[in-house]
Amino acid sequence: MSTIVLSNLHKRFGEFTAVHDTNLTVGNGRFVVLLGPSGCGKTTTLRMIAGLELPTSGQILIDGEDVTALRAGQRDIAFVFQMFALYPHMTVRNNIAFPLKNEGISRREIATRVDTAARMLRIEHLMDRKTGGLSGGDRQRVALGRAIVRHPKAFLMDEPLGTLDADFRELMCLELRKLHNALTATTVYVTHDQSEAMAMADDIVVMNRGEVLQSASPHEIYHFPATVFVGSFIGSPPMNFLAVDGGVPAGAEQVSLGGAAVPVPRTDASAAKALVGVRPEHVMIDERGALRGRVIADEYLGSHQILVVETALGIMRVRVGKDEGRVAGSQVGLSFRKERTLLYDADSGKLLPGAARQMAFNGNGNGSGGAYV
């Protein structure tokens, strides 16, 4: 398998910029997910890697070879689409074998590759059926089989599970990850579903408005989002953000929120305007807490509850145990886990460097990854 390198990749459609100067390396054998809302540029980026779109400027390297100007058929990649693109009048066996026949591979080799793929995907019993009568999940397996038999340098997948129901999509997430591990394949996968990304990815690339905002392991993306947008997009419910009173000087270990003094990890940079970011599970119901609020809703989710608390600084969501709910209208005090509290520059939306992130990654070793910017 291969490393994929994008260097200053830019794509414009008339006056609209779909992808803006993207620099990204997908490490050999990594499962990398391009994640973001509709229109963020993730599918356009994938299509440029595949050769289905030519970049306005920039460079694409696959396994060290400059493929920027090569046609899709010359890049030795396999593309799996959301809509499968199968031939409904052909059997499963013939669908999977079709790309190999076009390449002029011997009949014996084709049979070997097709049978191997069928065993991996557990579709041996479907091989003589026509794809037009198969379920969505089975058609997806056939589409994957057709990609696997080619032994490509990389697999590119554009929301391949988007048409499946929730339960089967969850199962296919597990199957895709197992398949990736078995093949040790370099995979670039596009989705707008954060659950898919967190479940499968070695590395997540979060995009918005044509730009890569953060590229890192799921752990880092979740616990240390690089921007306010990433913190708001990743997590259900998302990260809470509260405006700090006044600016934050470099070296600060305490900020003021609505007049309440809140301890934070030491910052290494200053900001004229700042935001505190904290995940709902790192907010505690604390009657001695300086920040006060009123519970306006209690979302029961079985294993835990989400309290929706109205404060003078806005709505906050607090994750508590399944038996720790509060009656709507009750007053509560709130405090934060200092080591899990982050500070952001309110103007740029970017994470301020600080001690908490550095200590966490020195201790956990979760800062490594195969995709980076």
Image (cartoon, rainbow, N blue to C red):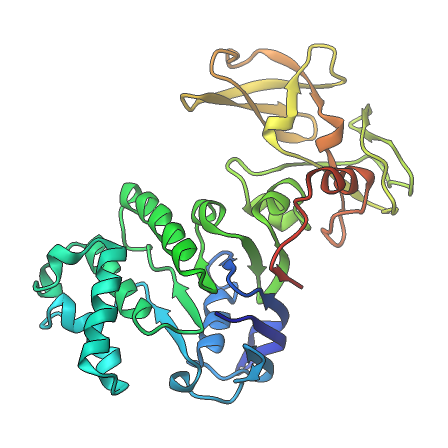
Residue 162 lies in what quarter of the image?
bottom left
Residue 83, visible in the rendered structure: no
Picture quarter with the C terminus:
bottom right
Image spot of residue 115 (x, y percent): 20, 65
Q: Residue at x 29, y 63 (%)?
A: 144
Is 108 drawn above or below residue 367 in the view shown? below
Q: Residue at x 40, y 83 (%)?
A: 72
Report the front residue among 316 and 21: 21
Image spot of residue 64 (x, y percent): 58, 80
Residue 57 lies in what quarter of the image?
bottom right
Is residue 13 left or right of 270 when viewed as pictured?
left
Image spot of residue 268 (x, y percent): 87, 45
Is 20 drawn above or below residue 178 in the view shown? below
Q: Residue at x 36, y 55 (%)?
A: 179
Report the front residue among 367 and 115: 115
Image spot of residue 53 (x, y percent): 45, 81
Report the front residue among 247 and 367: 367
